[in-house]
Amino acid sequence: MGRLDGRVIIVTGGGQGIGRAFALGFAKEGAKVAIADINGPAAESVAAEIGEAGGEVLAVVADVSSEESTKAMAATVVGHWGRIDGLMNNAAMFQRPQITDGPIEEIPVEEWDRVMAVNLKGPFLCCRAVIGQMKEQMYGKIVNISSGTVFSGRSILHYVSSKGGVTAFTRVLAKQTGDWNITVNSIAPGLTASDPERDQSAYEGRVSARSIPRVQEPDDLVGTGVFLLSSESDFMSGQTMVVDGGAVMH
Ligand SMILES: NC(=O)c1ccc[n+]([C@@H]2O[C@H](COP(=O)([O-])OP(=O)(O)OC[C@H]3O[C@@H](n4cnc5c(N)ncnc54)[C@H](O)[C@@H]3O)[C@@H](O)[C@H]2O)c1
């Protein structure tokens, strides 16, 4: 028996990296997984992997920064499976495409706006799109992906600011939704080797800062995601769990 048996879970940004690991891991635990990504072929490819392994899966093209698109995403999932039990707000702009890692004067204003639109407004819009369905069910699990950089203060300025917003958003939304048995929690990953095309020394450079001294892989986040989307965490809300091998501690 899987820990997510029969649960309908949307994973945004599930087409690659950490989102792909979540999608595969949740399917292994028995969830019906909707992979929502702006990159349609990537979502289809992960869906094919899950389908070949016998899982129930749906690929949905969605831009989390668009209200219309997130509403359509939720409607597609409800139309297909009749409910939404979990939302993993994972999509974000971080390393692909590369964003400016530099002093405040060098961050283009348009880039600041786009990072906020995807990383902060995105989770807001996705939650807004699913919350009515979850309230009707009197049950739902929302997980927002923040970042360990919120606690370490490490660069990148607009990226970290957006993730600080995600942590704050998690707390307030948790207060707003508890009456309907909806939990809202967050995971703050450490630097994770999610991009095989990136210079791998960047990942190796973090190893010495960790209590568990090795490179963090996308699979390292799956167990916490499963826990926060399963009934095991039904009395826990508004929390941020740092998963980074014991680097920052809060
Ligand atoms: N990789 C890390 O080191 C790290 C560390 C801390 C937090 N995180 C967070 O973990 C999450 C996943 O990171 P990753 O490294 O796997 O990222 P990634 O760049 O590898 O993948 C992001 C996915 O989101 C999708 N996406 C981007 N914009 C979108 C949009 N507007 N609408 C829908 N989908 C969109 C992309 O197509 C891609 O599939 C992000 O929230 C990121 O901020 C990552």
Image (cartoon, rainbow, N blue to C red):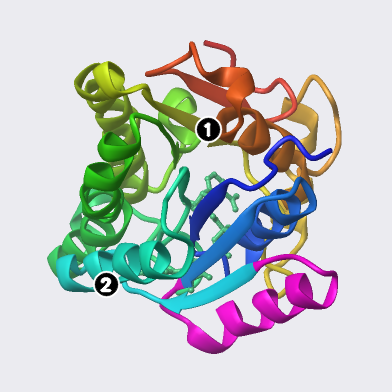
The answer to whether the residue labelled 2 contacts the one labelled 1, judged by CB atoms less than 8 Å apart, is no
**Is there any visible trace of residue 127 in the rendered image?**
no
| Residue type at the position of mark 2 | Ala
3D distance between C-alphas at marks 2 and 1: 26 Å
Q: What numbered label is drawn on residue 72?
A: 2
**What residue is shown with label 1?**
187
| Residue type at the position of mark 1 | Ile
Up the image or down, 196 lies above or below 148; here it is below
Question: Residue placed at 25% from the left, 31% from the top?
Answer: 169
Res 201 → quadrant? bottom right
State which tag comes first along the sequence, 2 or 1.
Answer: 2
Res 51 → quadrant? bottom right
| Magenta region | 37-56
- Is 118 part of what is drawn in magenta? no
Question: Residue placed at 57% from the left, 78% from the top?
Answer: 43
Residue 1: percent from the left, percent from the top?
Answer: 84, 38
Question: Residue placed at 32% from the left, 53% from the top?
Answer: 119
Residue 116: percent from the left, percent from the top?
Answer: 23, 54
